[in-house]
Amino acid sequence: MSRGGYPDAMPAASGYGDGYGGDASARASASGPDPAEAHQLQREHDAMLRQAAQMGMGDQMAQMRTETSAPSGATASTPPLWLDAWSDPMANVDADSACVESADLAGDGEWRLVVAGADRKLKVWNGTKIASEHDLLDAPAAVKAFYGEHLQGGGGVRRPFLAVAAGAHVFIYRNLRPYYKFTVPPLETNSRELEVWTRVGDDRMTAGEAWDELSAMRDNGIRLTSRSVDFLDIEDGTEDFRARRERFAARWRLNSGAAAANANAKPPPPPTQHTSVTCFTTLKRESEEWDAPESLVFGTEHGQVFVLDAKASGVEKRFQLDAAPAFVSAHGCLEGDHRVAIACRDSKVYTVKDGELSGIVLELEAQPVGLIRTAKHVVVGCMNDAIHCYHARGKKLYTVYVPAPIQALELMEIQRARTARCVVAALKNGEIRVYNDKHLVGLARVPGNEPIRGVRFGRLGREDNALAVTTRSGALHVKILPRLAKLDPDPARRAGPPPEQDIPLPVPKKTKLYVEQTQRERECGVEMHRAFQRDLCKLRLGAARAYAKVLRDGGGGGGGAGAFRGSKSGSKSGRGGGSGRGGPVSVRLDAQVQGLGPLFKILVKLVNAGNRTIRDVPIHLSCGKMYALETTRIVAPALPPGLAFECDARVTCVDPGAGADVVKVFVCDEEQTVPVITAVVKMPLSEFFE
């Protein structure tokens, strides 16, 4: 029984430091330890259960006791893929995938597990025991092992560096001892801000003037340093704000305090702004061998991407992006063909190709939560529970939707007779899914379906294919891949034509009429085609004649949208704005009736929808004998583009028994014989009062 309470997963005597014993299949089929050893292990496990029950984990451990090495949730279509090596629910590790790494730190072939936790502790596991623990100066963002050109140990043993990104620094460890610290170059400071603090240091500007100048720069969107931001925090109206500003500015004056007493005092340093590292990876320099020299590649909070030299002491290349990088993944060799994919917080994936920022930008549907870059593909996990796969040229190949939010993505590359590349997706519901392209080939769960924080696949101990999993409660699980595990998708589920394609369609039998029509088409095909073309030409000619008639006669007789409203659009041609004759100008006419009778009011609204001004547009009203118009002609003096001209006309119903009729509104053009626009207003029934 392993430390995590997985019975029959492997013999307890075959420890992690011994490379998990023999072959994985033999370990899976082992019958177990002898009775004395089994009794001792059972007592230790019962004590473990009692301790867990005291901490409120009794249900979880009871479930772990009944589980076997086969992952829960696995079905016949998704066979168990992982073997449980060991588990430590009390490991107390708070780290995501970027802070988990495995490396041959001693050069003895024993690959150790390195975890940089949020508690600023760097823990190293050798087998199932913690070999060492180191304090960090800041909360880590990522940890990575890499080989440098000058890292040749004694006796020709190759030992890697261990790089820990924390804050604005990258701490380099050699033999697990601090060796070098690389500081991210500071950001460029604005010249106006430098001028302000230079004048403050020379006592040529007061604290109040400096505050006003920096406040104006902040309002204009200029990025300021932390010194200026702290200075601007002393707002007007706060307690003793003037004295506090003077004390703050005096710290950066040359002739203040101890600086004035010391004749050799140095001038105050200029304001600088440092940034923080957000993501981290390595890129091979010359070859893709596992111990070949590498360069560090990392992104910062201000959208910068740096590529360091082989000694990790200087910047070799620098790129500026539009947003802060969240994930970075590289493939290839720096001195040859290489690609670097950077997923940023603006939901875009940028690509660096052979040292140049490529124009291919992948726009995602949601924020990225994981990134994998291979030779020809880019795999991105997003917050909408989807895994997208893109070609290197930017074309989307497929999308896989998962049942829970994605916590981490990891590339699983198996070196066999044929290299297999799969994607490991860790979900919030405790599932670990393995996809070969878009096919699910493996499924496992952590005990208790606990949310996963991070995963790391690689060599561990003397095992070539191991998976380290960290969970939200701080537990650490290690799973191994059997050497004979099948990663190819099920042939029955491969992509291809649907099975319905082989089912013949129920085509009806040929009838006598069908045969006769077919024979007629063969004999009279030319005549039928000519008849079709002749009818088509007649249809086009009729449509052209109708369109010409509308242009010649104008738009007339258009009804309104409502019972008491008329609306019609047309064209007004004339002189616009005194600039000579122009093209047609589109105008829109709206007419609306108000009142109960016998006195009505017709509201007319004329809008110029063109792009130039038209002048002196006549509006005429016409009605039958049952209505009397107060005026029959209204002239719109000028219609600028986009503005409306409104007027009204009074209408009186003179025949009480005639019912209701219509009133026509015409927009005319002095150069045309027909109205440009006609609106027909349906009048309501008049209510006469005796």
Image (tube, helix red, strand yellow):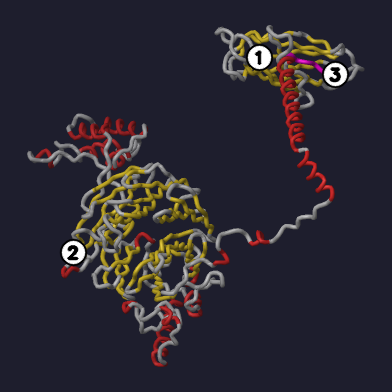
Question: Which residue is at 51% across, 55% downward?
Answer: 386
Residue 407 place in picture, x, y as percent = 45, 60
- In the image, which disc is placed on residue 152? 2
Q: Judging from the image, what secondary structure is the residue with disc 2 in?
A: loop
Asked if one can make out residue 347 in the rendered structure from this viewpoint, the answer is no
State left or right for residue 391 relative to residue 590. left
Residue 391 place in picture, x, y as percent = 45, 51
Q: Mark 2 belongs to which amino acid?
A: Gln
Q: Foreground mark, 3 or 1?
A: 1
Q: State yes or no: residue 642 in magenta.
A: no
- Residue on which disc 1 sits: 572
Check the image and report above or below for 19 versus 244.
Answer: below
Q: Mark 1 belongs to which amino acid?
A: Lys
Q: State yes or no: residue 663 in magenta.
A: yes
Q: Neighbour class for label 3 at 10 Å: few (<14), some, many (≥20)? A: some
Q: Nearer the viewer, residue 609 or 129?
A: 609
Question: Which residue is at 18% across, 66% downward?
Answer: 153
As drawn, the residue found furthest toward the front would be 523
Check the image and report above or below for 38 versus 291.
Answer: below
Q: Magenta part of the protein: which range?
A: 660-666
Q: Main secondary structure of the magenta part?
A: strand
